[in-house]
Image (cartoon, rainbow, N blue to C red):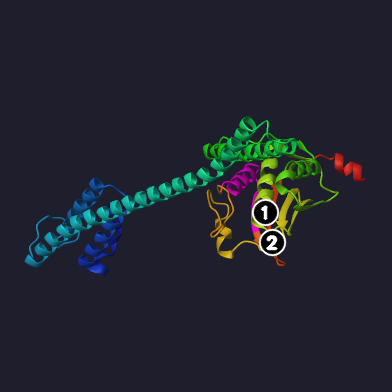
Amino acid sequence: MIIAVSTVCYFLSAFIGYKVVALLLLVTVSLTAMFFDILPVLCAAILSAIIWDFFFIPPKFTFLIESTEDLLMFFMYFIIALVNAALTFKIRAIEKEASKKEEKENTFKLYNTLLNSLSHELRTPISTIIGATDNLQTGNQKLSDQNKTELLAEISKASLRLNRQVENLLNMSRLESGFIQPKKDWCDINELVHEVVNRLKENLEKRLVNIEIDDNVPLCKLDFGLMEQVLQNLILNANLYIPEQCVVFVKAKFSNNNLILIVEDNGSGFPAAEIEKIFDKFYRLKHSETGGTGLGLSIVKGFVEAHNGTISLENREGGGARFTIEIPAETTSVNSLKNE
């Protein structure tokens, strides 16, 4: 960099003068300090001083400096170049250290968020299971059949919740390690959607789920298990955040060689300022009172992207939120033959 700038300045020295050359060389030294370690930067500073003396300070092509003013200027340049190089490098080192410190603080904050979430999300179902089993063991003679059925139902529900949280943690670990490789096979989208909704009946309780699947949706090559997780997390997320009287809509259609899955609701939607952060790991809506580790939507995004697809979130005009998934899917001609 020093030699390149010096070469250009040499051919322009008749127009710009050797004092301006000194300023240009100082700027070049500063730039090198932004990209290189201290040793090459100091070498660049020394080299720039030597080149400036030999090629630019009169008399040229000699290290002899006749003018006292030029001699003083040369020594000042030499000192300023070294100090400038050292200070610029030092500033860059401080910035790096500050960046590392900030990254460490963010990691610590993320770690605390995870612990706080897990302490609630894992402790609650475990406490329920322990309490219910204790009641069954110690008060078995006093409990009615209805009481026993209710306790077993609580154990089952808590076990499913616990299993879901463990699955989310394992899935996030697989995503971060880059281990996710979709095992694609022919999937019936109608079967996929209905199977997920039926499995979540106990969680959805009296919630109305409206399923709309276009007749022209063909068999698509997808990872059935991963897409089950995607739909399950989206439906459970809607179930957590919308009022009881609201409806969850699950839609599927096929357009331009893309499978389009939509999960939406007619609730209050998401705060506009938080939509961009909603897929971040461990992120939970501010002032939210419901449970959750904040992993569900980040896992959804990871599984969709593993299919080379995209997912977006927007608020519906009439109220509520809409998650739209678009996946380029290999399809079979069986469906089109059937329609013909």
Amino acid of disc 2: Gly
Asked whether the residues under the numbered discs 2 and 1 touch, taking CB atoms below 8 Å apart as contact, a structural biologist would say yes
Residue 25 pos. (x, y %): 25, 59
Q: Residue 238: x and y, percent?
A: 67, 53
Asked if the magenta segment contains residue 124, the reply would be no
Q: Is residue 199 above or below residue 11?
A: above
Of 54 and 174, the residue lying toward us: 174
**How many numbered dots are placed on residues in this image?**
2
Instruction: Please state the horizontal and vertical placement of residue 163, each as a whole percent of the image.
Output: 62, 37
Residue placed farthest to the front in the image? 142
Please give the range of residues in magenta.
Answer: 295-313
- Spatial CA distance of label 2 from label 1 is 9 Å
- Residue 24 versus residue 114 in the image, above or below: below
Kindly identify which residue carries mark 2. Answer: 267
Q: Is residue 51 found left or right of 100 in the rendered image?
A: left
Is 297 within the magenta? yes
**99 left or right of 180 in image:** left
Could you say whether the residue bearing mark 1 is in a helix, strand or loop? helix
**Label of residue 206 in the image:** none
Residue located 25% across and 50% down the image: 41
